[in-house]
Every structure is written in C-alpha cells, then in structure tokens.
Image (spheres, rainbow, N blue to C red):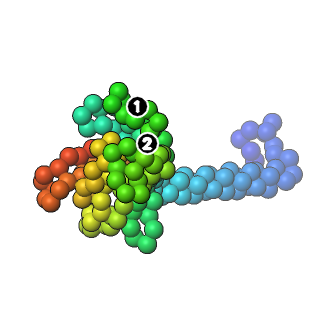
C-alpha cells in the first residue's frame, strides 16, 4: 500500500467514489449549460436572418420613433402590420385614422392596419415585389427591404417605378 505524503489526510472509505460522483455532476452541469447557451445563440441568430419580428420605425425626415410594426411570414410572403403608434406629429390625425387612404382603408385605424405586404425573398438579405402604404399620406408605393447589420436593422424602401427613385427608412429590430 502506498504511503500518503500527507499522513494526517487519509481519505475515508468511499471518499474517492463520492469525489468521482461530484466530478460527474459538475461535468454534466457544464455540458447542459453549454448546450443551453448554444441553442439560445442559434435561436437568436435564426430570428435575425429573416425580417419576421417586431420593428421600431424611424421617420426618415425627423428621426423620430414613429411606430412598432410586426412583420410576419406566411407562405414565403412577408406582411407588416402596425402594432402601436409611438409618436404623434402635429399634422397627424389625432385619432390615428387613415384619413388620406382610399378604398377599404379610408378612415380605418392605423393600428392593426397592414402597411407592408407581398414581399418575397430575393437573394441573401433582400426582399422585393411588395407594396408599402404610407398611412400619413395614403399613398401606396412599390416596396423593397434589405436586412442590415446582421438582421438588427431593416432598410425599407418605397418607390415608384425604379428603386433608385424613392425614399428609405431604417427600422430597428425590437424582438
């Protein structure tokens, strides 16, 4: 039997087995934590590689936070609906109705209204072929959107005819 360099610290019977069990628990805990972190990171990445989610719109003229728009995907087509108005400008309708819209949208509440529809993926981070409603003016434009900054920002462009002739807003992902 080997002698211990520390004779006053002789392990009790079964202490080695208890130490191995504790080591296994520690290793198992670290594996579970590492797996949970990996899944959370993958889930966060998956959420940012598509425009689906909640976006804070920023007015391109004033720089003011204007609204929250939820973009959803159905059958490969993306639609954006206003969930909340954040700022009311002096020339906005005080009841947040689409006073300048025509047809079925005329005088309807802007909250709950689809203002972006028909967009489909066209390349890595670009979505085209849809339309965009400006509820402030009631005008409808051709639309294109591009994910930026790893999916944390969304360039939303409304235009007539060619994408070069239009306006863009950069929206910020909220979730």
Outermost residue to the right: 13
Residue positioned most to the top: 90
| Count of numbered circles in the view | 2
Q: Tell which of 10 and 45 is nearer to you.
A: 45
Q: Residue at x 27, y 30 (%)?
A: 62
State which quarter of the image contains the N terminus.
Answer: bottom right
Q: Residue at x 38, y 53 (%)?
A: 115
- In the image, taking residue 163 as reference, residue 57 lies left or right, namely right
* Residue that carries the numbered disc 1 in the rendered image: 88
Relative depth, front residue between 172 and 20: 172
Q: Earlier in the sequence, mark 1 or mark 2?
A: 1
Q: Position of residue 80 (x, y in %)?
A: 41, 55
Q: Is residue 20 above or below residue 88?
A: below
Is 93 rendered above or below residue 146?
above
On the question of residue 68 being in view, the answer is no
Circle 1/circle 2 CB separation < 8 Å: no
Give the image location of residue 173, x and y in percent. 41, 46
What residue is rendered at 33% in x and 31% in y?
91
Q: Identify the residue position indicated by label 2 in the image.
A: 97
Q: Looking at this view, is 34 or 106 the one in front? A: 106
Quadrant of the image occupied by residue 24: bottom right
Q: Secondary structure at mark 2?
A: loop
Q: Disc 1 or disc 2, which is closer to the eye?
A: 2
Point out residue 117 in the picture as x, y percentages from the top left corner.
36, 61
- Element class at badge 1: loop
Q: 44 left or right of 24? A: left
Residue 95 appearing in the image: yes
């Amino acid at each position: 039997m080997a002698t211990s360099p520390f004779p006053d610290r002789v392990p009790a019977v079964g202490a080695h087995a208890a130490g191995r069990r504790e080591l296994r628990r520690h290793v198992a805990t670290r594996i579970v934590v590492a797996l949970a972190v990996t899944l959370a990171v993958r889930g966060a990445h998956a959420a940012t590689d598509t425009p689906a989610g909640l976006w804070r719109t920023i007015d391109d003229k004033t720089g003011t936070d204007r609204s929250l728009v939820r973009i959803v995907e159905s059958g490969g087509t993306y639609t954006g609906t206003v969930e909340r108005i954040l700022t009311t400008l002096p020339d906005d309708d005080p009841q947040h109705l689409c006073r300048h819209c025509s047809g079925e949208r005329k005088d309807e509440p802007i909250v709950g209204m689809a203002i972006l529809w028909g967009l489909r993926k066209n390349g890595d981070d670009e979505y085209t072929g849809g339309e965009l409603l400006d509820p402030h003016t009631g005008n409808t434009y051709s639309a294109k959107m591009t994910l930026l900054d790893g999916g944390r920002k969304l360039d939303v462009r409304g235009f007539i005819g060619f994408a070069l002739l239009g306006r863009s807003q950069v929206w910020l992902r909220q979730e």
